[in-house]
Amino acid sequence: MTGHRTAGIVALIAAALLALAPGTATAAKFRPCAPVVNPYPGTRYEGTDLTRIRTLRASCRTARRVARRAHYKALGLPLPPDGIHRFTWHGWKVRGDLRPDHDRYLARKGTRRVRWRF
């Protein structure tokens, strides 16, 4: 009988602790940043901006720098057969989906995230 009683008490304590714990449903939101306007003047990409720059746990200054410089590296890479670039730039793991009308990129470094569109 005491085993059931102890198990019941442990279950009540666990339920109380779960009720007091903060929920994980509150996800962090990406913050919008200004676009990088005409990053490639004098090239065939002149006039095309890096837009929809969004950052999570990084400053907009960092996000714009990552978008501009990582994208510049991406342009120098050969086109992948599956249409998805995967590379690293200064510790950032970058993934670029080239298949839709606009190329979409995501760079990750630890818990920081930067998204942009070309």
Image (spheres, grey):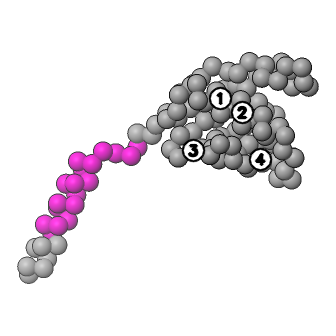
Q: How far is the residue under mark 3 from the one under mark 2?
A: 15 Å
Which three-letter amino acid code belongs to the residue tagged 3? Answer: Lys
Q: How far is the residue under mark 1 from the one under mark 2?
A: 6 Å
**Residue 47: horizontal and vertical position, in percent?**
83, 18
Residue name at image x 85 percent, y 19 percent: 41
The residue under label 1 is 65
**Residue 57: horizontal and vertical position, in percent?**
49, 35
- Hey, which quadrant is residue 97 in on the image? top right
Q: How far is the residue under mark 4 from the one under mark 2?
A: 15 Å
Which three-letter amino acid code belongs to the residue tagged 1? Answer: Arg
Which three-letter amino acid code belongs to the residue tagged 4? Answer: His
Q: Secondary structure at mark 4?
A: strand
| Residue 85, numbered label | 4
- Is residue 17 within the magenta segment? yes
Dot 4, crowdedness within 10 Å: few (<14), some or many (≥20)?
some
Query: Please, is residue 70 above or below residue 33 in the view?
Result: below
The residue under label 3 is 109
- Left/right of residue 33 with respect to residue 37 in the rendered view: left
Dot 3, crowdedness within 10 Å: few (<14), some or many (≥20)?
some
Magenta span: 8-25
- Is residue 80 within the magenta segment? no
| Residue 69, numbered label | 2
- Hey, which quadrant is residue 74 in on the image? top right
Of circles 4 and 1, the one toward us is 1
Q: Is residue 52 visible?
A: yes
Q: Earlier in the sequence, mark 4 or mark 1?
A: 1
